[in-house]
Image: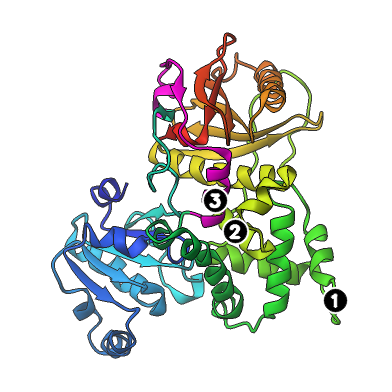
Amino acid sequence: MLTRKLAGKGAVQIEGPKWCGKTTTARQVAKSVLNLGDDTELKRSKQLLEISPKTLLNGETPRLIDEWQTIPGLWDTIRCEVDRRGEVGQFIITGSTVLPQATETIHSGTGRYGHIHMRTMSLWESGESSGAVSLKSLFDGETFEPIENRLSLEQVAYLLCRGGWPQAVTVDENIALDQSYDYVDDVINKDIQRIGGVRRNAERASRLLRSYARNISQQVPYGTLKADMLANDEKTLDEDTVADYINTLKMLYVIEDLTAWNPNLRSKAAVRTMDTRHFVDPSIGTAVLGLGPKDLMNDPDTFGLLFEDMAVRDLRVYTDALLGKVYHYRDSDGLECDAVIHLRDGSYGLIEIKLGGVTHIEKGVKTLKSLANKIDTTKMKSPSFLMVLTAQGDYAYHRNDGICVVPIGCLKP
C-alpha cells in the first residue's frame, strides 16, 4: 500500500496507533530519516524550522519524517516542497495522532498527501492465519474445497488478549500479554493529556475505556457511556465532556467505531445509523477489563463480543489492501449484520461473526439470507459472497446453499 501511494503522491502520511509498526514499515522504503522522536533532534529541528525549514527536508528520497506531529508547521513546509519539486515519492511522515487542526496549517495538503491508516497486525500478518481463504478470491467468484483450520478456540482466546502489537508477536506468551496493559496505562496517564492542551482526568478516561469494553461490538449511545463514567464521580459530567474524551481517544487511534452501511432495499425498513463501538485492537478491551484467555473461555458471551472486535480489526486490514471499507448494518426491523465489506467498484460481501458451533452458524446464515433478500438488486449488485466468520471450526467450507463458513485462522486479503 505504501509503495502504491508513493507512486501517486509527493508525500504519504502513515497514521495509526503507537506501537503498531508505522516507523518500522516506513524505514523499509525510506532512503533517509529525520527522527523527531529523539529529543535532541527535535530541539535542533525546531530551531531550523524558523531559520531554514527546507534544510530539514534535505536527504535522499523518500525521506522519512518520524513523529512529524511534534512540529505541526512541517506539514506546510513539506507541502510547499512537494509543489516546488513536482515529483512523487518524496516524503513519508509518520505519527500517532490525527492531522493538525486547521488553525495550525495554511493548507490541507489535498492533492499532495496520500494517507494510509495502519492498524495492529492481523492474524495473517502475524503468521497465525494460514491464509488459505482469500477475500479477493471470494470477490472474484472463486470457490474452495474444505480446508483444515489450525487454530483452536483456546489459541484464538490467547491471540485476542495478546493483540496484534508487533512487539507482542515476537516475545514469550506471558510477556506478550503485558503489552496491551502497558499500552492502556500510557494512553490513560500520558497520551490523553497531550491532545489539544486540555488537562483530562485519568480516572474518567479509564472508566470510559471500561465502558467501551463492556459495550464492545454494540450500538450504544453517549448516554450509556456517560452513565458508566459517572460512577463514583463527584463532579457533574455532560455529554460534551464525554464526546471530548471519545474524540481524543479517536485522535490517538485507540477507538475506531464502525459506521453504518446504507444499501438500496426492497423493504421500507429504515437503516439505523448509530456507530458500532470498537477498539483499534481487541487486546485493549481485555486489558481494561483485566481479562485473560481463561476468563474468555469461561464467559462465552463476553468472548463473542470481543471476538467480533478482533474479527473487525482483521477485516479492516484485509479490506484496506483491497481498496474497500468495512461497515455494519442494522435496520428498524431489528435485522443486523456484523460486517459488510464494500469495494470501490460497488462489489460487496456480507459477513456474520460468530464464535462457532452449529446453532450459532445457523443463526448467522439466517441473518445473511434475510439481508440478501432485502437488497434491491435492480439498483445495486447482488452480494459477491455471504460468509459466517468463526473463531473455531475444523474446516473452512462452502455449504450447499453457497454460504461459506470460514474460521478466522484461515483468512487473508
Residue 70 image offset from top left, x and y in percent: 40, 79
Q: Specify the label residue 255 is tagged with.
A: 2
* Residue 150, quarter of the rendered image: top left
The mark that comes first in sequence, 3 or 1, is 3
Q: Distance between the residues labelled 3 and 1?
A: 32 Å
Question: 104 or 152, which lies in front?
Answer: 152
Residue 249 image offset from top left, x and y in percent: 60, 66
Query: Which residue is identified by label 3?
Result: 158
Q: Looking at the image, can residue 384 be seen?
A: no
Q: Specify the label residue 58 is tagged with.
A: none
Asked whether 97 falls inside the magenta stretch, the response is: no
Question: 320 or 109, which lies in front?
Answer: 320
Residue type for callout 2: Ile
Q: What element carries label 2?
A: loop
Q: Looking at the image, can residue 235 be seen?
A: yes
Residue 43 image offset from top left, x and y in percent: 32, 90
Instruction: Establish if 375 lies above or below 341.
Output: above
Residue type for callout 3: Tyr
Query: Which residue is identified by label 1?
Result: 232
**Residue 129 as seen in the image, left or right of residue 300:** left
